[in-house]
Image (cartoon, rainbow, N blue to C red):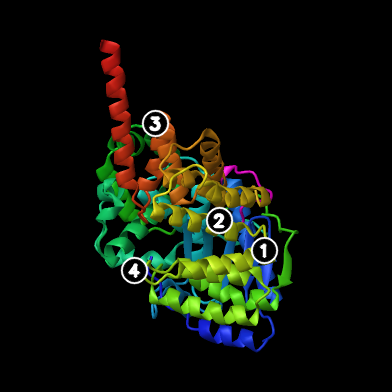
Amino acid sequence: MQRGLFAGAALIAALAATGAEAKWLRAETDNFIIYSEGSEKSLRDFAVTLQRFDATLRFRFKVPGGADSARLPIYLLARSEEVARLHGSPGGSVAGFYSADRDGSFAVSNRENYGDEMGTPDSQQTLFHEYGHHFMMRYVTAAFPAWFVEGFAEYYSTVDFDKQGRALIGKPARRRAYGLIELPKLPVEKLLFERSGALKTGEQVEVFYGRGWLLTHMLYNDPARAGQLSAYMTAINAGTDPKKAAADAFGDLAQLDKDLNRYVGRPLSYRPTLEPIPLPTNISITPLSAAEDALLPLRLERMSADNGSERMTKVRDNLKKLSVAHPGDAGVWFELAAAEWALDDEDRDLAAVRAAIAKALAIKADHVRANVLLARLNSFELDAKGDYSAGAWRSVRQPLQLANRTDPDDPIPLYAFYQSFIDQRVRPIDIAIEGLGRAFTLAPENVQVRISYAFALANKGDFDPAIKLAQSIAFDPHGGGGEGLLDQLEAMRDRSRGKSDAAAAE
């Protein structure tokens, strides 16, 4: 994802050098870690609302509550313009975004409250939408078609709470009105069956999102179609052909299209929960240290910038300045190493990466992500030398083992341990595959982990669960290479069955 330059990065580094007073606050709840420069009250109010939204989704989908071992970090910036610049859409209307990559998941939103006068503000709807995706990938095991992936996130994005504390579910997504009313309608058959990669223009995407939300709303709320969505999802997850599943569940698709066109003009109902969604009680808010305060915007910039970009170079340069101001902070040295590592090969200084990692580990020997980066650096250099001997690769796995012992609930060291065998060009040992499975359990929203686990299962002959994992990626309207992955796994399954049939015939 291309993202733009965060305008305040250099200023923040300069302020850090002068010892400016810390201004970022950190809120911790059962499921989130939230960073904000706003007031403690506004942060607490936001944390309460977000935690109640999570509780609403858990209630609706019967997902147990309690503390999450891998809480989602969320960064609240002051204005949507700052979010748009960070996202790479300067001057655009990006109120928030979500990222899930090999180094973990995070979301960005803003603290502005303008938007829908009938309910939640734009920034909150965007965050609820993105968290809906995160929740679906993390807690719901079924594979969903692209139209429902977006329809689900839009349907729940407008959740609000009344004075009694009940969740109001299914309120209108008014920002979709233009696409639904003014732009050409997308026929239901195309909505249901056309792959998301066919969407080429912004208008096509807008119509797809709007029609996906409208169909989801109708199937959830229209009594005449009660039970149809569940029947459809059950069928496609059982392997039924999507067109047969749709016809069996919805009936005549031409009639479904007519009903959907009429539905857009009807007053839309929404559902309150029968009981109030309880207020969370275990929310703690603490200020960051001076070093953490200066580092946080640069860390966010590093995670948002494209590898090898000019932005990453500027982040690296600002982190160098910050390391002078805070030489005793392990986090600063790790971020400097990570930014240097993220540069293109011709610009990257591997000696500088190793030196910064060494500084971080001298201060905090069990720094989890610094040990992971040390393993990646050692792997890169061994591969460059063509050294794949078992003895040499202990230098890759020892820091990963330390990282895992330090934080057994961090999926990144587990994934990196498995990947080390792939990088060494040897078959992963059983414990590495088990660790990869644990990493997937901890971070099922991580596409790279999901893809690796799908192939690991397929290589063991477990094709059905592997293909189910691939389907969830292939159906994802945000892409990720899932369609090619699905084709590869199905081909592996077919070859395996062909060999079995041939052996049985002999």
Mark 4 vs mark 1: give the one in front. 1
Q: Are marks 4 and 1 in contact (CB under 8 Å)?
A: no
Q: Amino acid at mark 4?
A: Tyr
Residue sitting at x 37%, y 69%? 2
Nearer the observer: mark 2 or 1; the answer is 2
**Label 2, on which residue?**
372
The structure residue drawn at horizontal position 25% and vertical position 49%, both measured from the top left corner, is 190
Mark nearer the N terminus (3 vs 2): 2
Q: Which residue is mark 4?
A: 178
Secondary structure category for the residue under label 2: helix
Q: Which is more N-terminal, label 4 or label 3?
A: 4
Q: Identify the amino acid type marked 1.
A: Val
Q: CA distance from mark 4 to mark 1?
A: 32 Å
Residues drawn in magenta: 61-71
- Residue 85 part of the magenta-drawn span: no
Identify residue for label 1: 48
